[in-house]
């Protein structure tokens, strides 16, 4: 008798986990034509979260332009594969890929303590750490550049390393390709 409740709890746990996973996929799935995009922004300070969402929406619109999409062919991952190959493996466009990223408050991350750091992502990770104070100031004063920063971090998420190219070089190239 003791084993049966344990199996029921385990099965219920698996079912709950499955339902949670489905809910997460539905929450962050790319938008279809005419639908509002949904972004996974987990930042408790509402003004910052709103600015990140605005930057994501602007970045997604920019990534729908062919000239901006060329970034995915221009940059490659550590194995030398164009970042477009990572998008194809994920089965999404560059604009839709932004909905697969998860944005967190990075105020406690050492990288955010550096001057001029607005966000950070590790190559190949779908987690982006937003440096709230600096990102908020940037988004307020130069919203297009905040959108470029989001695209910059998406490139890292797709596998682009850094140094080389330097962070400022990546942002400059994103700005040149996408902010026109």
Image (tube, rainbow, N blue to C red):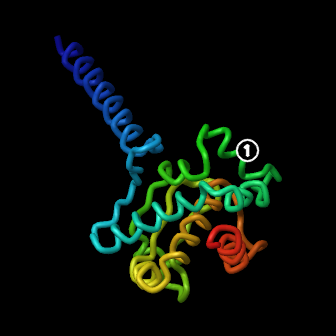
Residue 120 at x, y percent in the picture: 54, 70
Helix, strand or loop status at disc 1: helix
Instruction: Report the residue at 41% width, 38% height from top.
Output: 25
Quarter residue 76 falls in: bottom right
Q: Quadrant of the N terminus?
A: top left
Q: Please determine whether, in this image, residue 27 is positioned above or below residue 52.
A: above
Instruction: Report the residue at 27% width, 17% height from top.
Output: 7
Instruction: Report the residue at 38% width, 49% height from top.
Output: 36
Q: Residue furthest bottom?
A: 115
Quarter residue 137 falls in: bottom left
Residue under numbered circle 1 = 85
Q: Please determine whether, in this image, residue 54 is positioned above or below residue 88.
A: below
Residue 170 at x, y percent in the picture: 70, 72
Quarter residue 171 falls in: bottom right
Instruction: Please tell me which residue lies in front, 48 or 35.
Output: 35
Residue 9 at x, y percent in the picture: 23, 24
Asked if residue 50 lies left or right of residue 9, the reply is right
Q: Please determine whether, in this image, residue 64 is positioned above or below residue 175.
A: above
């Amino acid at each position: 008798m003791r084993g049966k409740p344990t199996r029921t709890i385990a099965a219920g746990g698996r079912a709950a986990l499955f339902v949670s996973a489905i809910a997460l996929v539905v929450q962050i799935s790319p938008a279809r034509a005419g639908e509002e995009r949904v972004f996974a922004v987990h930042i408790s300070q509402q003004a910052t979260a709103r600015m990140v969402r605005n930057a994501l929406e602007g970045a997604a619109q920019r990534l729908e332009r062919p000239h901006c999409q060329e970034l995915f062919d221009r940059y490659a991952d550590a194995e030398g594969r164009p970042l477009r190959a990572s998008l194809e493996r994920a089965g999404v466009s560059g604009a839709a890929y932004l909905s697969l990223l998860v944005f967190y408050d990075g105020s406690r991350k050492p990288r955010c303590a550096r001057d001029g750091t607005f966000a950070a992502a590790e190559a190949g990770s779908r987690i982006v750490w937003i440096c709230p104070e600096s990102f908020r100031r940037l988004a307020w004063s130069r919203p297009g550049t905040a959108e470029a920063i989001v695209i910059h971090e998406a490139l890292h998420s797709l596998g682009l390393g850094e140094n080389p190219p330097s962070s400022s070089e990546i942002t400059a190239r994103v700005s040149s390709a996408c902010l026109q």
